[in-house]
Amino acid sequence: MTGRQPRSTLEGGADCYRARKMSIGSPLDARTQPLNRKREWRDWSGYYAASQYDYLHIHEYVGIRHAAVLIDVSPLYKYSVRGRDAARLIDRVITRDATKIKPGQVVYTPWCDEHGKVIDDGTVARLDDETFRWTSAEPHLRWFGLNARGLDVQIEDVSEKTAAIALQGPLAREVLSRATGTDLSDLRFYHRRSARVGSVGVDVSRTGYSGDLGYELWFDAAQAGAVWDCLLEVGRPYAIRPAGMLALDMARLEAGLILIGVDYTSAKHALIPTQNYSPFEIGLGRLVNLEKEKDFVGRRALEAELAAGGPARRLVGLSVDYVAVESLYEAQDLPIAVTTATWREQRPVYAGRRQVGRATSGTWSPTLKQHIALASVVPEFEPSGSQVEFEWTVEGRRGRATATVVPLPFFDPPRKRS
């Protein structure tokens, strides 16, 4: 796809193919299938993704927080944006100032529709002066093409050509240094460089979705098995193991990281106004640069939102009172039985009789030893220390658990940025 003559998604390769929801194995399927003792899979953008490998996903979570894990993140959509006007296109679309992204740097960013509502969020990595790698949770080839009109830029969906592995955990640096034969201690947070894992060329980014020390590796899908095998082999002394979506969901929630389709709805799929979210409503206001020189999609709407007093909803963290949850079970003469799996259903949040928001996802945090949740609330309950209640159902009987608003992220170890 070029900026001068955009193609539709019908010509867009992976955008069209995966939209059919025909689940297939990722490039790492031959490696991940035999390791999945639980045989538990889910669909992720048309690929089979492991929910968990072990009989208890908590073992994989422990690997994220105390050792090192491999996570197949190949189902992410991946786009190559290159050409003289590549930076101009990205600057038109994202809320951050793309002209400040230097070669070797990676940024996390949302992008919006013309109403200032978030379409998706992802990373943009600058590979050289005229080439970027853009990742997202959903397909956007057509959207990027529409915004590229008049620009000298080529946009290619490389989702199926490019495999990706997230190597996460406090021992990830040692594993990757051994696999690449290079010292990666100087690769800074949200930066990238080229390296080799065995004989395979990879692009290494100091990024991840676990809220811990970690890296993401991007490479030719045809070489996926060789990269996985090398990482597993050199990682054995570091107790490396594969990890699935259930463990990652716990880790990302501890890190206060939002998930599309769970903590917010893409503007492409919103059916009613309340399903639309601006960046300021989902904790991404810090990534909106209204001072940058060039215009971007949604800018006027976002300026108007701030001029009117700011967003009507705010993302907050909730620390749930364990005793309050326990009492809901005791009231029915039941032992407490709270699952360790992250829940993703909407739960009303109250202040007295008044509903002041809704919790969107929550989990038991093994590291923090408490129940935590993300919630969208009205501005007056945004300050830390605010007391609320949210709905907790036990055996079909609705109750309320008390909770305190706390700063995000819940868990933020110094090693993540070291």
Image (tube, helix red, strand yellow):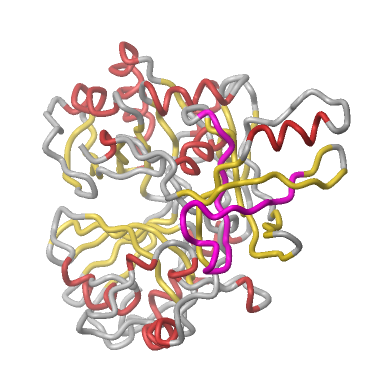
Task: Name the residue located 84 percent from the left edge and 26 percent from the top edge.
Answer: 334
Closer to the camera in the image, 232 or 267: 267
Residue at image point 45% right, 51% down: 76
Q: Position of residue 348 (x, y in %)?
A: 71, 57
How many numbered discs sit on the rendered protein? 0
Residue 215 lies in the magenta-colored region? no
Which corner quadrant of the image does residue 270 belong to? Answer: bottom right
Camera-side residue of 312 and 155 = 312
* Residue 72: quarter of image: top left
Going by the image, does 415 lie left or right of 360? left
Picture layout, residue 43 above or below residue 181: below
Q: Nearer the viewer, residue 285 or 64?
A: 285
Choose between 99 and 372: the one closer to the eye. 372
Q: Position of residue 95 (x, y in %)?
A: 33, 73
Residue interval drawn in magenta: 369-392
Q: Where is residue 40 shown, x and y percent of the image?
A: 65, 30
Left or right of 295 on screen, residue 272: right
User: In which quadrant is the N terminus drawn?
Assistant: bottom left
Rendered view: 284 above or below 343: below
Relative image position of residue 391 (x, y in whole percent) = 74, 50
Q: Residue at x 36, y 48 (%)?
A: 162
Quarter that holds the C terminus: top left
Give the quarter of the image for residue 267. Answer: bottom right
